[in-house]
Amino acid sequence: MSELDPVIHQPVRLRIMGALCGLSAAQQVDFSFLKQKLELTDGNLGAHLTTLEESGYIKVEKTFVGKRPKTFLNVTKSGRRAFDEHVSALRAILENGS
Amino acid sequence: MSNSPDSTDAEHALRLIDHSRAALRQAVRAHRGHLHLWLWGTIWIAMSISVHFRGSGATRFFPFLIAAGIISSIAIGIYQARHIRTPLDKRFFAALGCLVMFALFWPFLFGGIKGPRADIREFAYYSLVAMQIYILAGIWFDNYLLFVGLAVSILILIGLFVFPEIFWLWFAFCCGVPIVLSGFVVRYWWR
């Protein structure tokens, strides 16, 4: 049976992972765009992304578009697997009603 | 949220996930290939309609239309990549390069496309090459392109072999229009 992942279970990280797992495996989303869509601040999003990156759940790629620095994010295979298991665990709790 | 959640917490967590997905879903849809499908479908319609009404002399405008299409496609790609991007896949571009080189050079090596209705056979040939690019991209990235490529390839062949007398009209309405319509499907309904 799937278990809840304490890294993903934190509400902001849950939203981040939920959004990123909605992208295809090859797609990457811009940091500022994700911040705007999830209505988070730079510091808040940055701190949670660091936690997720340290857990190996997301990949952070810093690059330049023209002369402007850009940060693109996507979820890793292990991150997607962990998120799927977390969602399964949540559904199991809901179905069991405990 | 509690570390040992009950069903209320679980329901709340699943709702959070749904909301964050919904927030990004519209953006993901806006970054699909529908703009390219609308662009190239329209170019195909313009090309075939112009030949139908103005004769084969209209083909001299084809290189300009294709160049405008390529430039527009690149501009769309750059614009879309500001928020959501798909990093370039070198192996895909290598495979694409091989396909294009092969498709462009073999007619010259074997003396070109000659004989009756060479105009429509040549146009159908290069259109089929374009559809093989869709199929390749569909296998590599997103399977809707595979379906569009296969369906339009079949329609091109039907036009060439079954309706050669009305080929240009067939091409506009049964190949160009479906590509434009597939753009709407991809934009609004494809999941």
Image (cartoon, coloured by chain):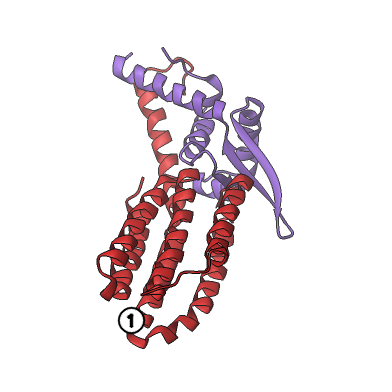
Q: Quadrant of the C terminus of chain B?
A: top left
Could you tell me which residue is drawn at 36 percent across and 62 percent down? B179
**Residue B52 or residue B177, whichever sits in front:** B52
Q: Which residue is mark 1?
A: B52
- Relative to B182, does residue B40 appear above or below in the rendering? below
Q: Is B155 left or right of A63, judged from the image as shown? A: left
Q: Is residue B35 visible?
A: no
- Give the color of chain B as drawn: red
| Residue at the image point whose x is 61% and y is 46% from the top | B89
Looking at this view, name the residue that lies furthest to the right.
Answer: A67
Q: Nearer the viewer, residue A3 or B79?
A: B79
Q: Chain of mark 1?
A: B
Across and down, in percent, residue B184 comes to 34, 59
- Above or below — where is A25 with respect to A66? above
Figure chain in purple: A
Label 1: how many residues lie within 10 Å, few (<14), some (14-19) or many (20+)? Answer: some
Label count reads 1
Instruction: Find numbered disc 1 in the image and state the secondary structure of the residue it sits on.
Output: helix
Q: State whether residue A74 is above or below residue B6.
A: below
Amino acid on which disc 1 is placed: His
Report x, y in % for residue B103.
Answer: 53, 59
Residue drawn at the location 45% of the way across and 21% of the way down: A85
Left or right, B47 with respect to B107, comes to left
The correct choice, above or below, for B82 with respect to B49 in the image is above
Query: Image quarter for residue A75?
Result: top right
Residue nearest the observer in this picture, B118 or B6: B118
Task: Please state the horizontal and vertical placement of residue A52, each as a whole percent of the image.
Answer: 61, 30
Q: Is residue B36 visible?
A: yes
Q: Position of residue B45 (x, y in %)?
A: 36, 73
Which residue appears at 47% of the width and 35% of the height?
A18
